[in-house]
Structures are given as C-alpha cells and as structure tokens.
Amino acid sequence: AWAADVKKPFLKKQYDGREKLYRVLDEVMVMHKKEDIGLPKPIFKQSEVSVPVPPHIQSIIIDAVLSKDIDPPSILRNLGILYRRLVHHAFDVGGSTLFDALVSEYLHTDNFQMKVDEAQANFIADGIKKERLELEGRGGAIHDGVTALTAATDLAKNFVDRRPIKAVVYSNSHNNLLSVAEYLYGSFDSENIAEMMEGKIEHMSYELGRFRNNYKEGKNCPICGGWNDYTGKKLTSCTNGLVEVSDREGNTYLIEKERIVRAVSEVEFNSLNDGIAFGSPVDIDRLEGAPLTKYGPSPTKYWRLGDCLVIDARDPHPLLQKRWSEDTWATYGSATCIELAESDGFEGRDNYLGELPFYQDGYAREVVVKLTKWQPCGRFHSRPRWDMRKKKNVGWYTGPTLEDVEMLTQKEDTFLLLLDASLSHGLDLSFVTHMFLLEPIDDAAHMEQVTSRAHRLGCTGPVTIETVHTWHQLDTNAKHVAKQVASTLEDETSESKKRTSTAICDHCYRSFDNLGLAKEHELTCDRNPNGNAIVDPFHLSSVYRDIRPPAPMIVGVPGTNQ
C-alpha cells in the first residue's frame, strides 16, 4: 500500500502522492524551525585589527631592498625567517619581488604571529569591558526571570537588553586559541575565564557549569587551606602545591607558594651571600619577561632545584590560614614522618606543614632560602599504606583530609569561555551574548553549526557573532619604498586569519564579498520564509518545510475562571 499509494505517485510528481506523504509525516514528526518560534536574528560583525610591523623590522627590509651590498643569511637571521629557495630567488631578482617576499615571510614568523594573537586578545578584552560597562549604564545585569525575546516583538516591547555579558572565544586552531588565551589571562582574572580547550569530559562539564552559573564547587584543604575544584571526581587528596626549602641554619620545612616574595637575581645574590655559596641566582630571562616577584605564581616549569628565594615567614600570614602547632602535628604522626624522611636521606616526599622555625612577631619577616623540592600537599601528607613496588610502608599522616570536609560553593564572575572547535558540537550556549571568531568561517554549514550553539531555543536575546580579522600595518616610509619598487603585496596577516568575506546571509549562512550581494541573495534564498525562491514541491525538503509545529496548548483564559 505504501509503495502504490505514496511512494510511486510522489516520485512521479503527482500531487495526491505528495499530499499523502505530507499527512503521514505530519503525524509522526514535529518540526520546530527558528522562524516558527520567532528567535531574534543573530548579529554578524566583521572587525579589523591592525598589527604594526616593528620599526626595526621595516628598517631591515628597506635596507635589504635599497642596498646593493647585502648579506642574505644575515638579513634572514635578523628577521627570524628560515632559509628557503623562494626567498633566495627573491634576493637575486630584488625590487618588488624581494620586498614582497621579505614582508610576506616575516608576517608568517612566530614572532609576528604572537603580535597578531596579542592584538586579537586586546581587541576582545576591550570589547568585553566596553559591553560590561554599557550594561552597568543600563542598570546592570538581570540574572533571573529574563523575559523571552522574539524578533517580532522586541521593538514593540521597547526591550532593554540586561542579560549578563557572556562571551565565547572560538577557534578552529588549538594553537591559536592557546596563544590568544595567554594574553586574555593578562587582561582578566582566572575566575573570569572558563576553558573548553582540552581535557576529559567531566572537566569540560565543570568548566561549562562555571561559565553558565557563575559559581564553582570544591573544598578547602584542612591542612594548607588551599581550594580544590570539584570536577566530577571524588576529592580525596589536596592538589595545591607546597614547596620544601632550606635555610642557612640548616632548617628544612614546607611553605605555601604564596609565601614566595621573589626569586633572587644575580646582583642581589652576590650581595646576600658575602662570598658564601647558598643556592643559585635566578636569571630574569627564565620567566620569559615576567618579573622575579612573579616566581611563586609562575608555572613550575620555570623552577629549578637550588633556586635562591626570599620568602615571607610571618605566621599568621595575612593571606593564609594559621599553621597547626607541633603538638597537633604530633597527634597526626609527625614523628613517623621524620623517621621516614631520615630513612630516605630527606630525598623522598615526606615532610609536613609544621611551625616555621622563626620567632613570630606579626611583622614582615623576609628570609633567604633555597628550593629543595615541590609537590602537591596531598602527596606530602599521605595516609599510611603498603607500597607493593617499594615493598615497604609509605605515608604517615592520620589527620583530616579533603574526604573529611564538606563541599562548598564559591561564587565567581565568569563571563568568558575559551572554546576549541573540536569540543563545540552539541553545546547549549543559548545564554551567550557574544561570540568572537579568531578565524573567518566561509563554509556555510560550519558557520551555521557555530552560530546555532547560541542562536537556538532558549535564547532570550540576539547573539553577536564577530569575526576578528587582523592586518599588518607598515609606516609611511615603508609604504613609500613599496610604492617606489612597485610592490604588489596585498595586506595579509596569516592565511588562517585573512578575511575572505564581509557579509553573511541570515538564513543559510553563506558568505558574500559585500552586503549588497548578501541582501540580493536573501531575496531568493530557499531558506528565507519570506523570500521569492522557486522551490521544487516534489523535493523531500519542501515537504518537511510544510510541516508546522502544533498549536500551543491553552490551559485557560487570563483574567477569567475558565
């Protein structure tokens, strides 16, 4: 019956077959299209950010083009460009070929791409700060009870958008996202940023929860007082790092990273030691531009055993909980800890966060120490157990751990999500107000998939999709030389971030070179419900399009008892 009554008539383009197919599908399918539920249209923006080429780089390129006595290997080395046959040929030709080759090759060096990433990060940070400031001018954010907004009624309601600013930075390149993220952390606090760049599912779910709800769950360690995030796994051991140091008097003890005031430079090291070697000074270049006062918060990859440090030995410390007394530690097994440490020649992981070996007068007390080891608090203070590999008892601590304290909720102000393209599929970001794309997306299906993360059922306002294009900028002198040698170089920063379109169709998400072409296309776009596109009635998609959502259920008439 199906083949004779529906399939064959429809394939023969008979309207009775189409009508029967429609009635069958209408009974088993529910089609909710975005135009049916009146979602506010997304706002597409194309922004340009200029990235100046450093003046000394421009000077090297100009000298290479205008000078007759040049040393190609030296020039390439100064520009940070790898030797390639194409570049070597450009030196032989000279003129515009050489100018174009040197500029183009430099724009693709790691040094310049870092400037590109920094410029993108600064643009995004400035934009978010501006939006948050304007939101405060509108009366501040309303976090609960936001009335649903539709494209048909937003102007009639004189709608004032007071949704909390929630921004997503999206990239198809994991390395690009990591580099831009590094600069964004320089503009915002860590609590302002959530990451979905890599990691396990439970961690991604935790980060998305922080971004959506503005709070995180976790526990404070009863030993060091440090916070431990709850990411879906049971919290059993504190992951906050503790540092073992030793002083000139031979004392060896644990400190929190917050006590590190600074690393000792070579100049200070020579003045402190008076010819007596104690540890090693820290080269300022090791922290990659960060001051030595940032040694404590810096990643441990910059740390070295024997580094000479200055610490704050106050107890109580204004930022830390007061340490337990030696009597308290004795009840938790500190004597066993000392025995195990001595048996390992103090090379193992045993030590405890006991009292500091200094007089405690409440005033700032800076002490010079040497770094001997570091590891998580939970590894220093581990429970007794039998180690099958070492064939001996390890651990000693019998006091309270994370398992013994309650889960806490800590409020945050998280308004920025770093999103890797590989982790974006299926996400519900209907609460997002802005999406920044680090690279242009010219594939319509891909652009629709990205936009639909936020432009979907549940959104209460329009989402702004902004592509951040970057372009190199030369000064007047370099432009004059380019014109003098008849350079044909077009503006570019990198192929992955080069703009190829300026307008996007609101319905099918295709990209166009200008707004006029996009508007002209929308008139005949087959996904525009108000367009004049000619649609084949016997294409299966047209049958789907005719299926409308069911009428809303009316429980009663407002203002009556019915």
Image (cartoon, grey):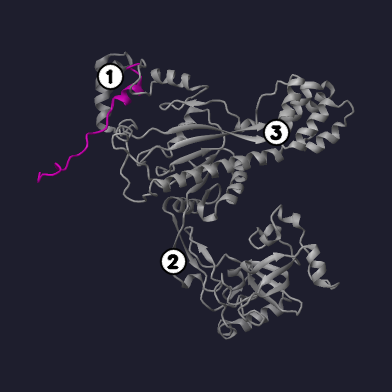
Residue 34 percent across, percent down from the top left? 34, 32
The one nearer the camera, 522 or 263, is 263
- What's drawn in magenta, residue-wise? 536-562
- Mark 2 lies on a secondary structure that is loop
Observer-side mark, 2 or 3, equals: 3
Quadrant of residue 6 within the rendered picture: top left
Q: Amino acid at mark 1?
A: Arg
Residue drawn 74% across the image and 28% down it: 478
Please give the residue where the numbered disc 2 appears in the rendered image: 407
Disc 2, disc 3: CB below 8 Å?
no
- Mark 3 lies on a secondary structure that is helix
Residue 73 percent across, percent down from the top left? 85, 34
- Mark 1 lies on a secondary structure that is helix
Q: Which mark is residue 18?
A: 1
Residue 559 percent across, percent down from the top left? 13, 44
Q: How many marks?
A: 3
